[in-house]
Image (cartoon, rainbow, N blue to C red):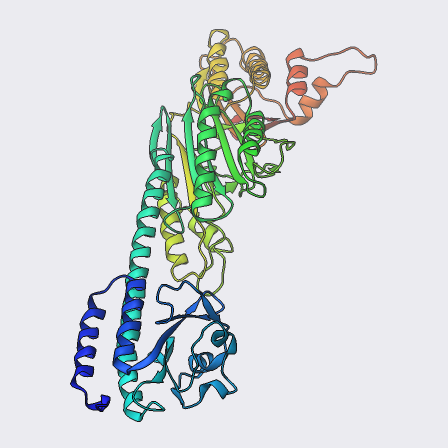
Amino acid sequence: MSDPQSNPSRQTVLIDVARRLSSTHDLVELIDHILQRSREVMDCEVCSILLPDGPDEDLLIRSTLDPVNAMEIRVPKGKGIAGDVYATKKIVNIEDALNDPRHFRPASDKSDLVTRAMLTIPLLDGEHCVGVMQAINPNHSAAFTAQDVEIFETFGSLIAVTLLRLESQKQAIHEAETRQQLSLAAEIQNSFLPAPQVRLGDVAVESFYEPASEVGGDFFFWHQIDDGKILLGVGDVCGKGLPAALDMARGTTLIASTAHLCTTMNLAEWMTTLNKRLCGVMKAGRFIAINAMLICPKTRRVRLCYAGLPGAYVFDGSVWKEVPARGNAPLGISCAARYEEAELPFSTGRHWMIFTDGILEVQNSSGEYFEDKAFSNALHVPPGSDAGMTLNHLVEQWRTFSLGASYQDDATVLSVTDHSTPPPCELALTCHPDTLRLVREFIETWADYHGLRDDVTGLLVLGCDEVMSNICKYAYCSTSAERPAYCRIASSADSVHIMIEHHGAGLTNEDFQKLVTPPSTGERIGRLGLHVIREIFDRVDFRLETGKSVIELTKAI
């Protein structure tokens, strides 16, 4: 028999195998080729390759005895000589493997092969073991020689590199397919979102939307309804990835198909209806948090309904303030859930903002939450600045804060700006019975714009009409050539304040109390208009200032 160590065909096989390994892309075909050629290289009865399979890292055997893997043999992690080599990353060359205490007998029992000599090598990528190869029963000697070990180790290094290349290619293909799928999913998901900016009459809507990954669970919506109302809001689907994207599609589709119901329903009723429909299509344990606004430009009123997200903010002309309202359960959890809303004048502020909790809950590298201090700082509006720039500033501050964050959720903000022209809040006139209608029109126009109820507006008009009538009748004498008066009106969160000034004879609070207090006889005295004023307003303040008389009226709304 010729000496296989000096056989030139062995080097030829290695060169041929190296060429084949560099061009093969199919793992099954590659392993079959490796096994057949390794048997030639090692001149032995059987060659096997054992690769980790599954998270437990059991070793799955493929050998020349079973090239198509018709009989699957698994070696549990740490068992057998192969398991020992896989764990220690050291070569084992044994002359009598069958009697070695590490020998894994279940593998031998499934084969007719009588194992004698066995050479086992780790397939290494640096310090990482990607598998094990074994050569069994050399044909040229009773045991594998040092030269056999050297050439098998060389052969194994080629195989390890090839396996890593294939795994890298497989991973790259998988990642490319995943990116393509996610890109398609993101494209589909974005198709459910409206335009990021829109102008609906005098109302401008602007959005910021940033998913934490390619596909997110946040969304925003706006719908202009036939009667001029505007339904808008933001939502956050529980979970991440494709399941959240599917629920987002369900949610936005149902919102779009039910938005028209807001012509006859208030916002709370619509949310209750939407919740019932979502409960019918969403899997148990999944839900959607939604904050919604319903704006009615005709009545100048806005309704807010919170369902699992932070409250809305409004700019009152000087600072941003949270709009208090009762929270409700997220949608899709219980069909029996009922929803409550808050209603207030749209003119409470020129700028409104609603957002998902991804804005507040992001943490910076120091572990601080954005809502701790950075959020209020981002909403700070320097005197004289335009609050409409707040969204851009908020987003800029949020992006800077979240750099290097260990966790970042989807984030969505919807800002609403009222561009309608407000009516004047001051009126100057000459007191005369014919000019009193100017005060009535002034109050009505202002009240309509600020969304006051008709009954409140009527009382304000009546009360101011009585004040102006008394000024005309009693404050100015009949010979007064000039009879100037001024009326100013303003509102706070819960009341309306009216200030009327004139230069005629005025009253003090003591005078007012005397005129509206009945005498002991029970007969009412004094001007009837003053009694009406006292009944309408919650606070009446008469005072005399230098060169003028002032009447300050306050009514709670």
Q: Quadrant of the C terminus?
A: top right
| Residue located at (39% from left, 40% from top) | 387
Residue most extreme to the top: 434
Image spot of residue 258 (x, y percent): 48, 24
Above or below — where is 63 with respect to 234?
below
Q: For residue 120, which quarter of the picture?
A: bottom left
Foreground of the two, 388 or 358:
358
Image spot of residue 264 (x, y percent): 53, 17
| Residue located at (43% from left, 39% from top) | 219
Image spot of residue 466 (x, y percent): 59, 13
Above or below — where is 213 with respect to 156?
above
Image spot of residue 323 (x, y percent): 54, 38
Residue most extreme to the right: 521
Q: Quadrant of the N terminus?
A: bottom left
Residue 155 as seen in the image, left or right of residue 384: left
Above or below — where is 391 with respect to 67?
above
Foreground of the two, 318 or 103:
103
| Residue located at (29% from left, 59% from top) | 172
Q: For residue 332, which quarter of the picture?
A: top right
Foreground of the two, 18 or 477:
18
